[in-house]
Image (tube, rainbow, N blue to C red):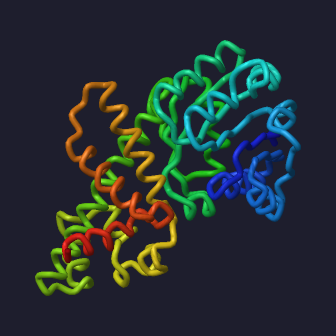
Amino acid sequence: MATIAFIGLGNMGGPMASNLIKAGHAIVGFDLSAPAVEAAKARGIAISPSAKEAVAAADAVVTMLPSGKHVVAAATGAEGLFAAAKGGTLFIDSSTIDVASARAFHEAAKAAGHLSVDAPVSGGVGGAEAATLTFMVGGSDPAFAAARPLLEAMGKKIVHCGGAGAGQAAKICNNMILGISMIAVSEAFVLGEKLGLSHEALYEVASTSSGQCWSLTTYCPVPGPVPTSPANRGYQPGFAAALMLKDLRLSQEAAGTAGAATALGAAATALYTAFAEQGNEGKDFSGIVEWIRTRDET
């Protein structure tokens, strides 16, 4: 059993920390959000008065924070988590952030004498609750070996993608595919409607043909064919449009830095920007189908 500090107890962090408790670990959590803290307490998570106090006696630290600047600011400096932790602590950053910040996180961890991995996740809130997340991990072989048992308590598939920042690179590429494919599936359903196809007929064909993809068979953007998709609950978010837009923007930042041509990624970013700017940031990202339908009608 390990003592683990969990920093960031929101919609994803709370259930992830809870699954570590179920695996027999002692968890001390911290979050700046009062509602997140109350929800964590209801899950049996002990709450520390500060992030520094949470990590002081921890064997491992998991961070789940909004952006790269938050991760670097929380971890580094004289008052940061690296300075507060005992020597040789394992740091697992499961935030989705830019590659440059992830690499800065690793460099600072190494300088402070700690092991570190960047380990962003895929699978959404449902995956976090069910401990079926996919972890895309970047870091050294020893750090990955140390992190793996903890990640396996929170996820179903653990992939070592390479060195520092490789986990973030994989997450960014994966979510660019997701954003593009959701737009493609949504456009196909809107076109099908105009051609007189029922949602069920198009789903039955595409889900067993060459159009099959996760955006269709797991997260179908129209009500009916996939009962568990957000389309059947008014597009209440499993994965909000604001988060999809964040990831798409990270993909375009990375593409610019790497000199990669991502025309469809750029187009998806532009479409999700327009969707979000019309007050849809809090809707599930699959709700873009309604916006596409409205655009076609004007």
Side (left or right) of 74 relative to 38: left
- Residue 207 position, x and y percent, is 26, 71
In the image, residue 210 above or below residue 117: below
What residue sits 38% from the left and 66% below the top? 286
What residue sits 32% from the left and 49% below the top? 269
- Residue 132 position, x and y percent, is 55, 57
What residue sits 49% from the left and 40% below the top? 136
- Residue 259 position, x and y percent, is 26, 25
- Residue 5 position, x and y percent, is 78, 40
In the image, residue 60 above or below residue 154: above
Farthest residue to the top: give it. 111
Quarter holding residue 180? bottom left
How many marks do you count on the picture? 0
Farthest residue to the left: give it. 195
In the image, residue 75 above or below residue 124: above
What residue sits 54% from the left and 26% below the top? 139
In the image, residue 104 above or below residue 137: above
Identify which residue, 150 or 274, lies in the foreground: 274
Identify which residue, 86 or 255, lies in the foreground: 255
Identify which residue, 221 or 213, lies in the foreground: 221
Look at the image and tell me in which quarter the N terminus lies. top right
Look at the image and tell me in which quarter the C terminus lies. bottom left
Identify which residue, 64 or 15, lies in the foreground: 64
Side (left or right) of 104 relative to 85: left
